[in-house]
Amino acid sequence: MSAPAPVLPDSPQEPAKQWERRTSRDRSQALRRTVQFAFLALNIWIGVEFYYFVRQFESGGAVFNVSRPPGVEGWLPIAGMMNTKFFLLTGQVPKVHPATMVLFIAFLLSSFVFRKAFCGWLCPVGTLSEYLWKFGRGTFRRVFFLPRWLDIGLRSLKYVLMGLFAYAVASMPPVAISEFLESPYGLVADVKMLDFFRYMGVGAAITIGILAIASIFVQNFWCRYLCPYGALQGLAALLSPLRITRVPDACIDCAKCAKACPSRLPVDVLVQIRSAECLGCMECVAVCPAEGALDMAVSRRWKVRPWVMAAGVVAIFVGIVAVARITGHWHSPIPNELYQELIPRVHEFSHP
Ligand code: SF4
Ligand code: SF4
């Protein structure tokens, strides 16, 4: 049953607008938090398992009872781009690190279908980044905004970085990609990445510390300005059929949506949000008080409920990984004997 229709204060020029207060409970943020923390927990579990996988080779043991979690390859997005290019040009699923390609496609597809949902719903770095600024807002009772000229300049940085990576991958023919990924460096690229975090240099630690502090004060500092993977997801989202859609007749111009938007998009004045910066987070929808004024939607009539977003994002991820597992394109066929040879010497291999 709907609540009595409140009436906005009259102005001399305009008649009061009748509107209906939203009575249905919004569950978008509870659902999003559940998906975010489940994915964060999955990544922590993968990281711990991979650590023990690597340790068993470093400690020189003869018993290998920890298997390598292929999901770790989600942290090799450049290899994912390379393998996807290899697959598109040759029609063959790459032998080494096929999971990079599987996850790269799954994340890109989720952003295409569900409006950059990788950043807003799945990415563990995005989740940490979001809770850092929420912590900052809770502690200091405000968030800080960079001046517009600096904000626009910095926002383009992530596209420049993405362009550099895309150029590097585009300039590699398929044979160079397989040579690179089958080289000792390519085979243990995931171990190299683990070592970056395990034996972090002072420079890298200071840089990460600065980014973390900046993220406390400025909303999504890393994601908004620097993340090349997020930039790519944003380009995929530009083609998405889904958009935050505002119905001006139902909207009461309270501007709560714009205030809540972590990407600082002018949700309260646009009819549709087409920006590559929209994370599909639905924070704007969650705070909107007017029934039917704001929704994630394909069109004015075809709205997408929060549970559909959550189920869809999870279904794309689980479905694509399941297909890869069933068809045998999930695990890298690198034998333990080769890992035993390469992992203790991993510091000898540098980028070709
Ligand atoms: S417009 Fe809405 S869905 Fe998009 S980033 Fe802003 S709050 Fe999130
Ligand atoms: S939250 Fe935004 S869309 Fe909803 S009524 Fe207020 S201005 Fe309109």
Image (cartoon, rainbow, N blue to C red):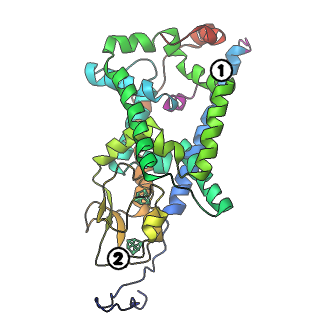
Compared across the picture, whether 311 is left or right of 170 comes to right
- Disc 2 residue type (three-letter): Cys
Q: Which mark is residue 54?
A: 1
Report the Cα–Cα distance between label 1 and label 2.
56 Å
Secondary structure of the residue carrying tag 1 is helix
- In the image, which residues are magenta? 59-74
Q: Quadrant of ligand 1?
A: bottom left
Report the front residue among 243 and 342: 243
Residue 234 is a magenta residue: no
What count of labels does the image hold?
2
Residue 60 is a magenta residue: yes
Residue at coordinates 44% horizontally, 58% vertically from top-left?
Answer: 264
The picture quadrant where one finds residue 64 is top right
- Disc 1 residue type (three-letter): Val
- The response on whether ligand 2 sits within 8 Å of label 2 is yes
The picture quadrant where one finds residue 6 is bottom left
Residue at coordinates 38% horizontally, 26% vertically from top-left?
Answer: 164
Secondary structure of the residue carrying tag 2 is loop
Is the residue marked by circle 2 packed among few (<14), some (14-19), or many (20+) residues within 10 Å?
many
What residue did someone put label 2 on?
251
Compared across the picture, whether 21 is left or right of 33 comes to left
Compared across the picture, whether 186 is left or right of 348 comes to left
Q: Is residue 287 visible?
A: yes
Q: Earlier in the sequence, mark 1 or mark 2?
A: 1
Is the residue marked by circle 1 packed among few (<14), some (14-19), or many (20+) residues within 10 Å?
many
Report the front residue among 193 and 218: 218
- The response on whether ligand 1 sits within 8 Å of label 1 is no
Query: Mark 1, mark 2: which one is toward the viewer?
Result: 2
Q: What percent of the width, then of the height, locates residue 32?
A: 51, 56
